[in-house]
Amino acid sequence: MPIEAPFYPIVYIRGYAMSMSEIEDTVADPYMGFNLGSTKIRQRWDKKIVKYFFESPLIRLMKEHGYVDIYDDGDERSAVGAKDGKSIWIFRYYEESSGDLGTGKVQDIEFFARRLGELVERMRDELCGPALGATDEIRKARKAFKIHLVAHSMGGLIARCYLQNIAAGKETPVDRVFTYGTPHGGIDLRGLGNIPSFVKFNEIDTFSEERMRGYLKIPKAKPVTSLNGAFDESRFFCLVGTDYKDYDAAKGLAQRAVGPMSDGLVMIKNAAVDGAPRAFVHRAHSGHYGIVNSEEGYQNLKRFLFGNVRVEALLEIAELSLPPDVQKQVDAGKKVKASYHAEVVARVRGKRWALHRRTVDEESAIFIPFEKVTAQDPVHLASAFLMRSERVDPSAQGLGFSFDLGVVVPEYEIDGALFLKQHFEGGYLYREKINLEIFWENGEPKLRYGFDSKQPNQTSRSAEVTKIEENGGFVGYEFRIPVAQNTRPGMKGTLILRSFGWG
């Protein structure tokens, strides 16, 4: 069966089930949660619910991209009905732990990862043909065989255990991995730190850093968030949730146990793999306001799997001017300390949702220590994947998107004491909506931009562009846009967009 890039078969791996009753509920669902949608997008200030119909990732992949499931007449019949291999497979790893369908014994993560490897080989056999007695055509198909792994929460750790442990040193057909709210750095509890490895009830030590190092094969010299060379980080996407207040599991227990700067269960700092592209969305770990059951989650998923262009956005700060009263203290020889917060919201033209969102009010802004500013070390703002087929106007040549960018005024500390004179909470050193459009001329990308404060919704200026080379070879393009707010306090710097082909 011919399988064409990038529409490879998708394997969905669900998250952790804490109790046996949750395991039984899980195995009773053919899609193990990937079919769940939502009609609730957010609670307003008056506690009324904003209604928005998101059918589910499963249904959207079927409706928009022609995927089919593997179920037929009550059985798992592999890719019956699939066209060009566009099939969705549910890794039903909890079945063997179920009292109804299995042994009733909860297995460890290495067991699940081995079973994932077996599923991958079964998929290759069924979609391409078995290795035994294979024809030249079957051998060619087996060699070219690729899949995508899409995982929620602990499912992402199962994927990593497969890649970094079970299949380590071997070639695997995994092309891309997408994780929703996975605790790549383990789970931390407020006041207690990382879950201790001696807590083993229902394999909950799976989220202990000490235990993770063992099943991910990571030496102590490296962080547990490292893929340790087992997989290309650029093909591993991490979606990070930031809305801990809407996480309703255990009736708010998780909110109190984990708290702010999290999705209600996983801390923001633990939710991404080192060096991997990532996006932040104001969604909870699961539930009606959950990260999987969201338009934002799905849009990042399909653009990462099927997109054409990858963009990495960075902010290079050249100068941050101080308020006049603070500058006087500096001139007088006093020591001034401060840190900053950067806000960024990434959107695509014509859509009602954001691909990426980090703000101070939602407790997810980017922390910039003063040392990073003085070193002029660029701050990573966002990763975005774009699809030419998703243009609002198909006749338009370019891909339109935007960044709401802000750098927030900090609290200044002078000789160890807060300096609140002339301080107004929520003030900005820089704040602008920057409109952008990538288009192509003779195969070369160009970037137009514009500032909403000067020309709303327009892109009339051309960005400076240079080629990016790594290890002596061409890899992409870098665009530089000057940004400045000439006030005191204010900011001068450069928005850097690095564009790479994606496919």
Image (tube, helix red, strand yellow):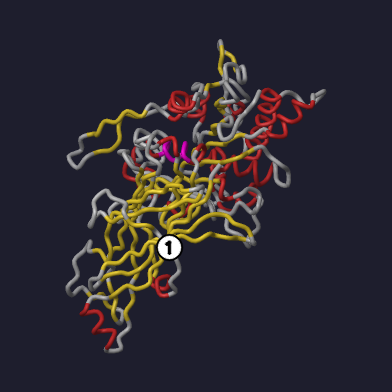
Total residue callouts: 1
Residue 272 appears in the figure: no
Disc 1 target residue = 379
**Residue 266 higher or lower than 327, as above or below:** above
Could you say which quadrant of the image residue 397 lies in? Answer: top left
**At x 33% / y 40%, what residue is drawn?**
353
Left or right, 450 with reference to 234: left
**Callout 1 amino acid:** Val
The reply to whether the magenta stretch includes residue 118 is: no
Type of secondary structure dominating the magenta stretch: helix
Q: Can you name the residue that lies furthest to the front here? A: 442
Q: Quadrant of the C terminus?
A: top right
Point out residue 371 in the picture as x, y percentages from the top left corner.
Answer: 42, 73
Left or right, 83 with reference to 389: right
Q: Which residues are magenta?
A: 297-303
Q: Can you name the residue that lies furthest to the bottom here? A: 332
**Residue 484 higher or lower than 121, as above or below:** below
Point out residue 308 in the picture as x, y percentages from the top left corner.
Answer: 50, 42
| Camera-side residue of 170 and 244 | 170
Point out residue 269 in the picture as x, y percentages from the top left corner.
Answer: 45, 55
The reply to whether the magenta stretch includes residue 301 is: yes
Question: What element does badge 1 sit on?
Answer: strand
